[in-house]
Image (cartoon, rainbow, N blue to C red):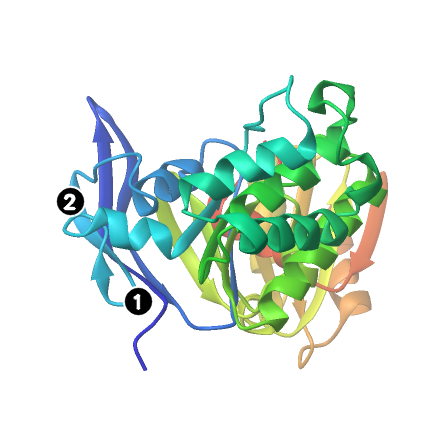
Amino acid sequence: MTPVLEVRDLRKVFGDLVAVDGISFAVGEGEIYGFLGPNGAGKTTTISMICGLLKPTEGEVLVQGLSVADDPRAVKRRMGVVPQEVALYEELSARANLEFWGGIFDLRGKEMKDRVAELLDQVGLDERASEPVKNFSGGMKRRLNLAMGLVHDPQLILLDEPTVGIDPQARHKILEIVKQIVAKGRTVLYTTHYLEEAEDLCDRLAIIDNGCILAEGSVDELKAQLGEGSLLTVQGGFGAADLTTAASGVSGLQPVEIADGRGMLLVGRDGPGVSHALEGLFQAGLTFDDISIKEPNLEDLFLRLTGRELRD
């Protein structure tokens, strides 16, 4: 079956800056595919090339087998875009915003009225539909922004960090709406730097940084890349070189991230265990101010792949 979205060797260069560096991926029908990465990783640039706002330096984008470069009008009718920056007419009502956008996609008469009413109800704005958008809270604007991208009932929806800067209740509402969209057979490309969103929402994920896809798969597949075991985090007055040397002498202990005064190490499940690992580090002469143990997660994998925090 042809993927709904197929990205092939996509690359974007701005002068000396390589913003997106030859990435490839495909998204199937009814799937939520996530881009997980920090600000500046290349997520928005990728979205902009997929929807035709930016011309790729190299590579191509196909939507239901149609090329964005060769047939942009046909592709855009199959695609809904919800940008990171809210794009609404503040002086118009919620209903008028949706009607304006629906008109661009040739919705008219009863079809327009029914679709706008359906969306206003879905995003919880039906009782405020006649108010000017300038009176809305940030969460309400985000929900209306999402509805604008859905007004023409597209097959593919591109959501670029749709929950940035809103409260947990509004974020929960938007995530529930995304799940409803996919339950109807639609396909979503979802960019975020919120780990909990990615784990809860996405069927598959790509970890992206510096314009490159560093890892791809389901949440369980990505976690498996860290191996089975526990993550041991230690803090103290040691140097990075001292911890690296000490860890190399302990069987079943693998460094994940090591810096002066802090280290994260994977204790293999089939190895001697956490107690043995700590004993080996103590015997090497290290002392610690704080020790914690947890199961590995996606943020730990991100640290291992990039060497920096997810929210940097």
Position in image of residue 278 (x %, y %): 78, 59
Q: Nearer the viewer, mark 2 or mark 1?
A: 1
299 in relation to 27, above or below: above
Q: Which mark is residue 64?
A: 1
249 in relation to 50, above or below: below
Amino acid under disc 1: Gln
User: Total of numbered circles in the picture?
Assistant: 2
Left or right of 243: which side holds 305? left
Position in image of residue 58 (x %, y %): 15, 44
Quarter the C terminus occupies: top right
Q: Is there any visible trace of residue 203 in the rendered image? A: yes
Image point 76% across, 34% down: which residue? 139
113 in relation to 239, above or below: below
Between residue 79 and residue 219, name the one nearer to us: 79
Question: Tag 1 or tag 2, which sits nearer the N-term?
Answer: 2
Disc 2, SS: strand
Q: Quadrant of residue 53?
A: top left
Position in image of residue 144 (x %, y %): 66, 38
Between residue 232 and residue 245, name the one nearer to us: 232
Q: Is there any visible trace of residue 193 in the rendered image? A: no
Image point 81% across, 58% down: which residue? 293
Q: Which mark is residue 12?
A: none
Disc 1, SS: loop
Residue designated by label 2: 58
Image point 67% across, 64% down: which residue? 180
Between residue 288 and residue 125, name the one nearer to us: 125
